[in-house]
Structure formats: structure tokens, C-alpha cells
Image: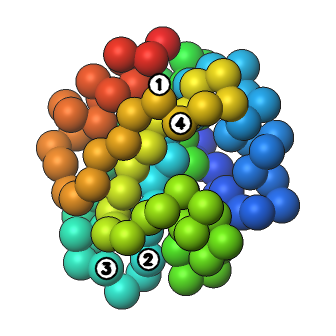
Amino acid sequence: MANNVIEITTQNFENEVLKADVPVLVDFWASWCGPCKMVSPIIDELADDFEGRAKVGKINVDEQMELAEKFKVMTIPTVMIFKNGEMVQKSVGAKPKSEFAQMIENNI
């Protein structure tokens, strides 16, 4: 995981995501998921690109099943944007970097 990417768990979800003062992009992924492996380096780049303007985190659905269930993640990768404690945008499946970047830009 890149330096600027936060590993999100049930323990830190509230502080890192819901109470964040900037938009938070959250990638729901798993190690066995092929499309997740394609998206992972993009997520890492976005963390660097938006440093200071947005947070970027990853949730391993195998380790954090409670969070995956809470947000009804049925397919991975699922990428969500949280702003002011609410999920405001969602994307399912592998997408180009430009689409994920636009999700962040739309919420800054």
C-alpha cells in the first residue's frame, strides 16, 4: 500500500472516513480479485495526486466484512466517495484513473 493510502478498518473507519474534514475515496478490494489488482496502483497514484485535498483509503473486504456488509458491497472493486460523514458517490468495477479522479474532483 502506498504511503498516503490509509488502511481502513472497523476500528478507524469513523475517525478516518466519517469525521474527515476532506472528501475520502474508499476502495473496497480483496487480494484474490483480478480487477482489484488493476485498480490498486491507480488508487495509490490518486492518494499522491490529491494529498492534502482528499484522503484515499482501502478496505480489504475479507478482513473487514462488517464494513462491506454495512455498505452493501456485492462486487469488487467498489469505490465510494464519502463527504461530511455520508457516502455521496459510488462506482463498481475497474475504471480508468480519470474516472476515479473526477469522482474526487466532483466532491472537493
What residue does disc 1 label?
Answer: 50
Q: What residue type is labelled 2?
A: Ala
Which of marks 4 and 2 precedes in the sequence? 2
Q: How far apart are marks 3 and 2 (CA)?
A: 5 Å
Q: Which amino acid does label 1 sit on?
A: Phe
Front tag of 4 and 3: 4
Q: How many marks?
A: 4
Front-lying residue, 37 or 69: 69
Q: How far apart are marks 4 and 3 (CA)?
A: 23 Å
Q: Residue furthest bottom?
A: 32
Disc 1 and disc 2 in contact, CB within 8 angstroms: no
Colouring of the image: rainbow
Q: In this view, does 18 lie above or below 28?
A: above
**Percent from the top left, x then y, of residue 36?**
31, 68
What residue does disc 4 label?
Answer: 87
Front tag of 1 and 3: 3
Disc 4 and disc 3 in contact, CB within 8 angstroms: no
**Percent from the top left, x then y, of residue 66?**
67, 72
Instruction: Please give the label number shown on residue 33.
Output: 3
**Percent from the top left, x then y, of residue 56?**
54, 41
Q: Which amino acid does label 4 sit on?
A: Met
Mark 1 Cα-neighbour bin, 10 Å: few <14, some 14–19, many ≥20: some
Instruction: Please give the label number shown on residue 9.
Output: none
Q: Distance between the residues labelled 1 and 2?
A: 23 Å
Residue at x 47%, y 24% (from the top left corner): 50
Which of marks 2 and 1 precedes in the sequence? 2
What residue does disc 2 label?
Answer: 30
Q: In the figure, residue 104 lies in which quadrant?
A: top left
Front tag of 1 and 2: 2
Q: Is residue 22 above or below residue 34?
A: above
